[in-house]
Image: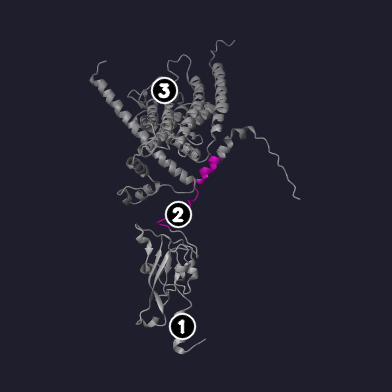
Amino acid sequence: MAKTVVLERKPLSLSERTYLPQIVTGLKTTFSNMFKEKVTLQYPEEKPQLPQNYRGVPTLVKDPNGREKCVSCQLCEFVCPPKAIRITPGSVPEDEEDREHVEKAPQEFEINMLRCIYCGYCQEVCPEEAIFLLDEYSSSGYTREEMINNKAKLYELGGTLPDKHYKWDKKKDAEEEGNAH
Amino acid sequence: MEFDSEMLQQLGLKALFALLMVSAVMTMAGYSVLAERKVSAWMQGRVGPNRTVLPFVEHIPFIGPFLKGLGIFQPLADGLKFLFKEEIVPGHVNKVYYYMAPLVALVPALTTMTVLPFGEYFDEAGNSSPLILANLEVGILFIFAVSSLGVYGIVLAGWSSNSKYPFLGGIRSSAQMISYELAMGLSLLPIFLWVSVPGSEDSALSLVGIVNSQNDGAWLLIVQPVSALIFLVALFAETNRLPFDMPESETDLVGGFHTEYGSFKFGIFFVAEYAHIVVGSAIFTTIFLGGWHFLPWIADPWPATWIGTLLGIGWFLAKTVCLIFFFIWIRWTIPRFRYDQVMNLGWTKLLPLALVNLIVYVLLVTWLDQPPSVTP
């Protein structure tokens, strides 16, 4: 059993009861603090160092061949807790030869940034790894309409990400050269 | 009384000096706001205001960015903001006193400086006369009388706002002022005893007399440290500075007496507070730090010409600025006292201490001043 030790409190000496020595000590501390290095980040000129797993604005990305990855399965729209995503599905044009094995693509893809809560569920649920929350954190606008990111804006924000799977290339190869499975 | 041209000239000159002094004190008040923001920022590891700049100054190499970094133009922007903000007068206030309160707070702060000597002027014969707007024989009494009027501004603001927090702020402020006025007055009595030479025709209540008594000798801070300490503590209380900022303690009273004020009326309160600090620092410099005289026991090293006048004024200002820095430094070091602690300190610590101090110096001065013929 732990033994409780009651510490004797020494009575304050006369100089301690005037509080003046303590005030002088405090003054010394604040004065030396004046010359320490400042911790302020001069924001618009200096940007903060973001961690690797930072969840910024959700964006759409293209695969290394510059093709649209999204197949408009609408899983993200379904999982999105605040219902910020709205997808209008469409089909891939017949004449696009390097995408002939893909059936669907979004005709329009809207993310309402006034509703988005940056939870990252859309990125987690996407079977095609087409939607990513990247390191863009500062989005602003003058109207509500401006805050709805459409497909063009989403691709502009996302750009192309390196993708080690090359899923569509593999699928195309399999179609052309016989079933590898 | 007849008005001849000489009198008019005198009047014009006095008016010009008064205008100069008001602008000097107001500028210093504005820049002590900036100093407060900068020093607090440095003490907390921040950089403080460093964005405001005039368009043409920005393009001067080296100097422009340096001034911008110091935030030299920030008071300008602050003042303009107060001027152009919307005047909001809440519906429940007593209009007459609501409008009057900021002025009542500002006027005493600016009035006290009329009797404040800030330098000396040498005529061709080498005789010195003090630089002062009104050389009253009872200067310090005048300062006590007028500076305590400043509390009326705060009480009026608190009462006319017709709202709980300002009311509490006003009440606290009046109680605090009354408590510390006593200790402040008592702490200065030994000074007058010490300064007044028996048989002298000069009034010992004159601030000029007090300053000149410190020329070439010890500062009164060294002779009477206890008086200086009590006076300084009471000065903090009188100017409503932390650790005694009862009237506007943000954490328990929202904004205190100025909760219902906005725009320029709040600006006047703000400037009045800092004008009080500037004038208070100047008074402390005059009484305890030798005014415009050089270091203790060292005669003024500057010549008795206009150069000496300018250097003397500069030296006086330097001391005042150091004291203003001390005010700011204390504010960002010590937390606020509780209201009952403030009262307790004022009535049961400072007042008895001031009385004991007075009695000790009465005995000491009596012993020092007794004529040698009496002793056998």
> Label 2: how many residues lie within 10 Å, few (<14), some (14-19) or many (20+)?
few
The residue marked by circle 3 belongs to what chain? B
Which residue: 26% across, 20% down? B7
Q: Position of residue B76 (x, y in %)?
A: 34, 42
The residue marked by circle 1 belongs to what chain? A
Dividing the picture into quadrants, the one containing residue A84 is bottom left
Give the camera-side residue of B221 and A49: A49
Compared to residue A57, the image places residue A179 above or below, namely: below
Query: Looking at the image, which residue sits at the far left?
Result: B5
Q: What kind of residue is marked 2?
A: Leu
Give the camera-side residue of A174 and B180: A174
Residue contact between numbered discs 1 and 3, judged by CB atoms under 8 Å: no
Q: What kind of residue is marked 1?
A: Lys
The residue marked by circle 2 belongs to what chain? A
Left or right of residue B307: residue A81: right
Q: What kind of residue is marked 3?
A: Phe
Q: Position of residue B71 (x, y in %)?
A: 39, 46
Residue located beneath label 1 in the image = A171
Residue located beneath label 3 in the image = B142
Whether residue B293 appears in this view of the structure is no
Magenta part of the chain:
A26-46
